[in-house]
């Protein structure tokens, strides 16, 4: 079958529209990534990023200094989806290493921890994750435009656009940005040819 775009059908799905496409391209450029995906909220972005690479029974290892909504998502909702999250001290690199098992599918942290405002060692966390062939996912909500985790080894950004990107707190949104460097994290950004 011909590709949908080559047949001149343009945007064939409500989420795909010129405004969203511009946002996704611009946020990918701001974060220094390969491609972007707009979502309905920051928690939706985090959820999509993790569900994309996990299956029931899998787990992730996460820093313990998280925005409250993310902590609730990880500690309660993901359990209902049969995903386990192991929380480790955000300042203890060895704790991240020790928590990884053969079921671990990602390492997760925030670029500027909430509420401790600590900044992780992205390069060290990426090295730990990559040594186990898993990606480093970073929530860059607070650091967008200032902190560039992808330049320091992170593979995926999943963040809220409601705060600093939107600037006024008048709308809800989120985004995922893929570095394009880790095999399992490629984003779906074009319509299906079917």
Image (cartoon, grey):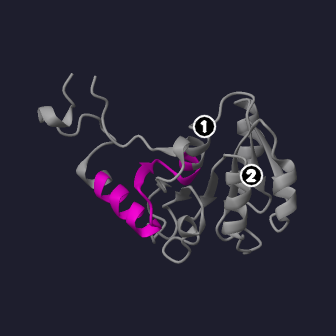
Identity of the residue drawn at 47% across and 44% down: 186
Q: Residue at x 66, y 46 (%)?
A: 134
- Judged from the image, the secondary structure of the residue bearing numbered disc 2 is helix
Residue 109 spot, x, y in % from top left:
69, 59
Figure quadrant of residue 121: bottom right
Residue 154 forms part of the magenta stretch:
no
Side of 84 where 2 appears, left or right: left
Percent across and percent down for residue 54 are 64, 35
Residue name at image x 57 percent, y 72 percent: 143
Q: Out of 65 and 100, give the one closest to the viewer.
A: 100
The answer to whether residue 180 is visible is yes
| 21 displayed left or right of 146 | left
Q: Report if residue 24 lies within the magenta region.
A: yes
Name the residue furthest bottom.
146
Mark 1 or 2, closer to the camera: 1
The residue that label 1 is drawn on is: 51
Find disc 2 in the rendering and name its residue.
71
Residues in magenta, as a range:
21-45
Main secondary structure of the magenta stretch: helix
Image point 30% across, 38% down: which residue? 14
Q: Quadrant of residue 128?
A: bottom right
Q: Is residue 9 left or right of residue 87?
A: left
Distance, label 1 to label 2, CA atoms, is: 16 Å
Task: Verify CB contact (< 8 Å) between mark 1 and mark 2.
Answer: no
Per the rendering, the mark at residue 192 is none
Please say if 124 is above or below 74: below
Q: How many marks?
A: 2
**Neighbourhood count class around disc 1 (C-alpha, 10 Å): few under 14, some 14–19, many 20 upward:** some
In the rendered image, residue 107, in percent from the top left (x then y), is placed at 71, 52
The local secondary structure at tag 1 comes to: helix
In this view, the residue farthest toward the front is 131
């Amino acid at each position: 079958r011909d590709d949908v775009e080559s047949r001149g059908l343009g945007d064939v799905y409500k989420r795909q529209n010129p405004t969203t496409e511009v946002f996704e391209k611009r946020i990918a450029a701001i974060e220094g990534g390969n491609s972007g995906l707009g979502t309905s909220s920051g928690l939706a972005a985090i959820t999509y990023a993790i569900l994309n690479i996990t299956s029931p029974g899998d787990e992730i290892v996460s820093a313990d200094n998280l925005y409250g909504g993310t902590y609730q998502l990880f500690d309660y909702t993901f359990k209902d989806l049969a995903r386990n999250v192991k929380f480790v001290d955000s300042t203890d690199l060895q704790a991240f290493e020790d928590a990884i098992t053969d079921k671990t599918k990602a390492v997760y942290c925030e670029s500027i921890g909430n509420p401790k405002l600590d900044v992780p060692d992205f390069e060290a966390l990426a090295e730990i994750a990559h040594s186990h062939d898993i990606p480093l996912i970073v929530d860059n909500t607070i650091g967008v435009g200032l902190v560039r985790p992808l330049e320091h080894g992170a593979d995926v950004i999943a963040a809220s656009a409601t705060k600093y990107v939107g600037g006024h707190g008048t709308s809800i949104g989120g985004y995922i940005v893929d570095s394009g460097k880790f095999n399992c994290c490629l984003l779906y950004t074009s319509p299906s040819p079917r």
